[in-house]
Image (cartoon, rainbow, N blue to C red):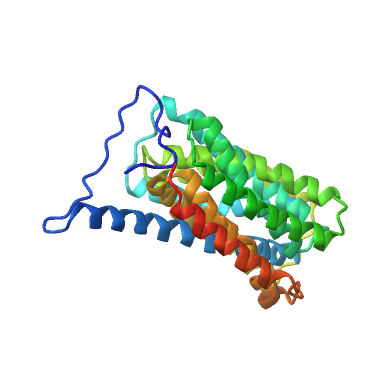
Amino acid sequence: MKHNDSAIATPGIAVSTPDLTVPGLPAAAAHGSHVGRGLLLAALGVAAFSLTFPATAWGLEGMGPWTVVMLRSVLATVPAGAALLVMRVRPPERRHWAGIAVVAGGVVLGFPLLTTLALETSTTSHAAVVVGLLPLTTAACSAVRTGARPSRTFWIASLVGAAVVIGFAVQQSGGVPNRSDLLLFAALLVCAAGYTEGGRLARHMPGWQVIGWALVLALPVTVAGAALALSNEPVALTVHSVAGVLWLAVGSQFLGIVAWYRGMAEIGISRASQLQLAQPLLTLVWSVLLLGERLPPAAPVAALAVLVCIAVTQRSRG
């Protein structure tokens, strides 16, 4: 199988590839099943992530931004840490801890904090379309970090998809970047780094272990941060705020990332990241259904353009 991230494994480290053939099943069919499973897992991760901004908005109804961010990470560590203990998982090798630290900094702390602060003054629909640039930043980060070389067609389709997202964002914001936009752009960079390292590490260990160890590594910071936030920010618990934080912890921070990292490991970081082009449109739908926001008139056109780009990138070869 030729991944777009053909150089994703660290040079000099042998990575065994599982035998994907099934007795009586042609190799091509086994290959197709393998790719299909990776696409499904990545798509499930995107579906979970699409609820992140609406859930964050719910959480902010009854808690401060720092409380939401730190609590979601602490709560996510409970199932992740329990799974590591029950399965008696040995700590990762020393060479993997740097990558796990990047995942912790980008996915556990950086992206949640920056986007939550942005959502204090930005609507979820606006934030969704800005963060729609994440597939392109992830693919670029992957190319730099792993030596991946996606095809020209891949990059053209990615740039077109990014242009659609940018145009949509500019049309909605009036073309004037503000503080929330700067926070969201910073979130793109740290999240892309975390996704790239997580996808790389998921080729050496299961995805749930990658995010599990990242959450454990960040635990001293998140526990201290939660204690400080709870003592300095007002808390007025509501059904929405509790449900929002619980989804952020279990759905977005743990289960979604587990599926996402496994999907990236199976089909390549660059190709999997393009599935996230659909995430802003999914978030727009949730924003209407859960938050009562008005769906922008340009959304159906943008959705069609984005889906075409996804189809092109998935057919391209690196």
Left or right of 85: which side holds 275? right
Please name the residue shown 29% across and 58% down the image: 33
Residue located 35% across and 22% down the image? 12
Above or below 59: residue 99: above
Q: Quadrant of the C terminus?
A: top left
How many numbered tags mark residues here?
A: 0
Query: Along the line of sight, which residue is nearer the eye, 310 or 51?
Result: 310
Q: Is residue 199 above or below residue 301?
A: above
Q: Give the residue displayed 41% in from the left and 50% down from the top.
A: 262
Q: Residue furthest top?
A: 12
Q: Position of residue 226 (x, y in %)?
A: 67, 48
Task: Specify whether residue 311 is in view.
Answer: yes
Position of residue 217 relative to residue 41, above or below, is above
Q: Residue furthest left?
A: 24
- Residue at image position (51%, 40%) is 214
Residue 108 visible, this angle: no
Q: Quadrant of the N terminus?
A: top left
Q: Closer to the camera, 87 or 4?
A: 4
Residue 167 placement (x, y as % from top left): 75, 57
- State the residue in front, 123 or 236: 123
Residue 193 position, x and y percent, is: 58, 38
